[in-house]
Amino acid sequence: ICHQYGATMVDCDPEGGKIHWLQNPGKNQDATWTPRYIGRATAMHRLRIGHFTQSERWEVLGLPIVGGPQAPHSVLPVMLFTGPDDLLDATEWTAQVIDHSFYHVLHGVTIKKFQARDGSMLDSVLLASQEGITWLRYDTTTNSWQHELIGIGEQTEKPVTGFFGSGDVAAEQIGSDPFAYVTTIEPFHGNTVAVYTKSSDALLTGLRWERHVLDVAGAEGR
């Protein structure tokens, strides 16, 4: 769980964005769950747990929505927290900044084993942000994080709302292809529903994606 967010994404708490996991007390039904500290980053908003770089320890991907208070379009740090040897004795998990130069207004995330058809069972994520839809993954051949842009999202609402790109994202299946298309709501807290279809059912790398708008809520004539 992440908490101490602040009043809003603009008025976020610069000392907040704390992450804890809650330890189940087991058979003692009268006991409260024990909070165990993982780490923090200002405006922490989304968390996903998985095996992103290796399969020996749990990792938590931490995604703030903005970089700091009074800066709604500031660049934000994408964080990775790696579980310690002893989860109960640790005072904090090892933290790593994956990226602190690319993402702004990061809101939606979906996790799957997107590289399974390429022989890797590591988890990776699709991210919805001001940049659009991005596939963020760890490449074990180069031991580095890679992001591949699928689409830039909705751009026409920027003069009216100040937001652009994408807000929420999911990946869906057709037949034997578990990642046949990507569904989105755009932009941040937006009213446009779109899907992205790819040029083939091959691996996700090196593909062309085409955006199709399905509906715009509140548009004229609806």
Image (cartoon, grey):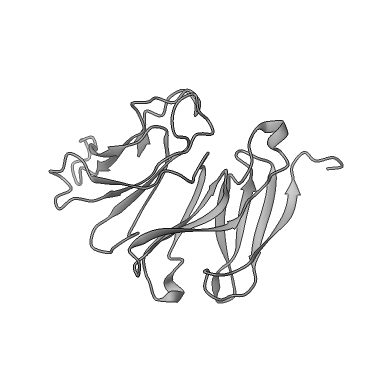
Identify the residue at horizontal 35%, vertical 59% (top origin): 52
In the foreground, 165 or 8: 165
Which x, y percent locates residue 214?
73, 54
Which x, y percent locates residue 187?
63, 42
Identify the residue at horizontal 57%, vertical 53% (top origin): 133
Query: In which quadrant of the rendered view does residue 175 lie?
Result: bottom right
Which x, y percent locates residue 155?
69, 44
Describe residue 163's horizontal placement relative to residue 121 as left or right.
right
Which of the image's four quarters has the C terminus? top right
Identify the residue at horizontal 87%, vertical 42% (top origin): 221
Query: In which quadrant of the rendered view does residue 136 lie?
Result: bottom left
Position of 213 relative to 44 (above/below): below
Which x, y percent locates residue 216?
75, 45
Describe residue 222's horizontal placement relative to residue 61 as left or right.
right
In the foreground, 146 or 36: 146
Task: Tell me how many marks there are.
Answer: 0
Describe residue 145's horizontal placement relative to residue 85 as left or right.
right
Which of the image's four quarters has the N terminus? top left
Identify the residue at horizontal 80%, vertical 41% (top origin): 219
Position of 50 relative to 102 (above/below): below
Position of 8 relative to 61 (above/below): above
